[in-house]
Amino acid sequence: MISRNKNFCAVGINFILVPLVLTFFPYLISSFTPARFGQLADDAAIVIIALLLNHYFWHVRIAWFNRQHPWRQLLQCVPAILFLLFSRVGSWLNVSWRLLNGRILLTVIFIALAEELVFRGLLLPLSLSLTPRHGFLAVVISSVGFSVAHIVNLAHMSLGVVLLQLILVFATGILWGTVYLTTHNLSLTILLHICDDLPLFMMKSTGSLSVGSASQMALAAAIYVGIALVFCGIALLQIHWSNLAEARH
């Protein structure tokens, strides 16, 4: 792991890496890459850049898989799984499996791999090195980075919808960051991410997102903030429980 002073720079780079690549890389490859492969190419570039930066500069140990205490790991995933079931059940009921093909599957896998590598695999431990013995704060920092990366959606969504998305993405990041912090198993968060994104690529109907009235948007924002606060409370309990379990062993 690099020194504490250099970690500030590393954290900043991980904050901007995903939005920078998603904003500018398409212009570099548009002349020779079909549009349907654009997202796959963008996320593959993020994975390669992040791995190279880590190999040459940061040297963060990424816990891709962990076979120890599988039942304890599964328990740590329960809040994230329950939220995933609740938030995506409608999407899964509206999927058309005929739309699934190798390109879509690879695209979803690389989206999950890129974002989990950057925000959980790298940004979380780098943040933890800046906030020793404060795992929850590191989870919050990584979740803010995860949320900020979705600002690029302003290119095709309204400001109100994107703001709501940022809050919900932050809340989701709290759950997934806690899973990685307590299980040291990035494959779990990658799998959760895949299950979250896959139905969106196979929807039978994809109508445009409608923007409600100001009062409706404010109510939705209040609900999402409430969800984020609840998830923060759950994360604190999970981290505390994990610390106690590790102390016993």
Image (spheres, rainbow, N blue to C red):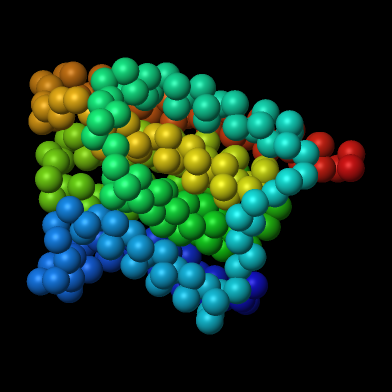
In the image, 187 versus 231, the foreground residue is 187
Number of labelled discs? 0
Left or right side of 80 for 97: left
Quadrant in which the N terminus is drawn:
bottom right
Q: Is residue 3 left or right of residue 101?
A: right
**Residue 13: x percent and y percent?**
41, 69
Q: Quadrant of residue 100?
A: top left
Question: Could one spot residue 3 in this view of the protein?
Answer: yes
- Quadrant including the C terminus: top right
The residue located at (25%, 55%) in the rendering is 39
Query: Which residue is painted at 26% across and 20% down in the image?
Result: 94
Q: Quadrant of residue 86?
A: top left
199 is higher (above) or lower (below) than 11? above
Q: Is residue 146 visible?
A: no
Residue at the location (46% across, 59% down)?
Answer: 118
Instruction: Pick whichever, 184 or 219, lies toward us.
Output: 184
Q: Measured along the vertical axis of the image, is residue 186 above or below residue 11?
A: above
Query: Who's the residue at 25% across and 31% down the image?
Result: 98
Pick out the residue farthest to the bottom.
Answer: 56
Q: Does 140 appear above or below 231? A: below
Task: Where is residue 183? Give x, y as percent.
Answer: 67, 43
Front one among 9 and 194: 194
Q: Is 91 in front, or is 230?
A: 91
Q: Position of residue 29 (x, y in %)?
A: 18, 71
Q: Residue furthest right?
A: 248
Locate residue 34, reporting x and y percent: 14, 61
State which quadrant residue 127 falls in.
Answer: bottom right
